[in-house]
Amino acid sequence: MARLLGLGSAVLFVFAVAACDGQTARSGKIDKDGVPAAGPASVPANAIAVGDDLYMVPQGRDADGCEIYQAFSTTKAVAQVIQYRTRDGGFVMDNRDSVCGR
């Protein structure tokens, strides 16, 4: 029974953290109780603007040496997927369609 209660508490904590407002979740700051702290997220200095409060942020290179990017926004939900830059400046998820494509 204690194990079940412990699992229930963990699930409740995860749900509570996931349900917090977007600004808190994106700030990346943790307060003294280990809970995400409120505060606006700032746009990374190396971000590439691609839309209204939508940016692509370089994340390094993949195993093939291709530059990878991740979407970022201070106010919008974004897909957490790896993306690659295309020759025309767009972004795609398939590196075969990217500047680095084979």
Image (cartoon, grey):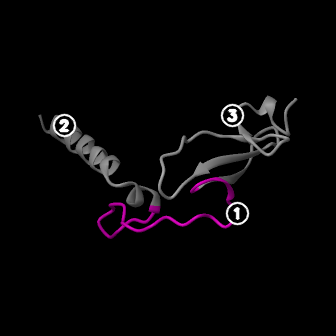
Dividing the image into 4 quarters, which one contains the N terminus? top left
Mark 3 crowd level (few <14, some 14–19, many ≥20, 10 Å Cα): some
- Residue 46 disc label: 1
Amino acid at the residue labelled 3:
Met
At 46% from the left and 57% from the top, the residue drawn is 26
Quarter holding residue 65: top right
Queried whether the magenta region covers residue 45, the answer comes back as: yes
Dividing the image into 4 quarters, which one contains the C terminus? top right
SS at mark 2 in the image = helix
Mark 1 crowd level (few <14, some 14–19, many ≥20, 10 Å Cα): few
In the picture provided, is 17 more to the left or to the right than 83? left
Residue 39 is situated, as x and y percent measured from the top left of the image, at: 41, 68
- Report the residue marked by disc 2: 3
- Report the residue marked by disc 3: 93
Amino acid at the residue labelled 1:
Asn
In the picture provided, is 72 more to the left or to the right than 25? right
Q: CA distance from mark 3 to mark 1?
A: 20 Å
In the picture provided, is 21 more to the left or to the right than 7? right
At 28% from the left and 44% from the top, the residue drawn is 15
Queried whether the magenta region covers residue 31, the answer comes back as: yes
The answer to whether 79 is drawn above or below residue 96 in the figure is: below
Q: Earlier in the sequence, mark 3 or mark 1?
A: 1
Dominant SS in magenta: loop
Mark 1 or 2, closer to the camera: 1
SS at mark 3 in the image = loop
Quarter holding residue 27: bottom left
At 75% from the left and 42% from the top, the residue drawn is 90
Q: Earlier in the sequence, mark 3 or mark 2?
A: 2
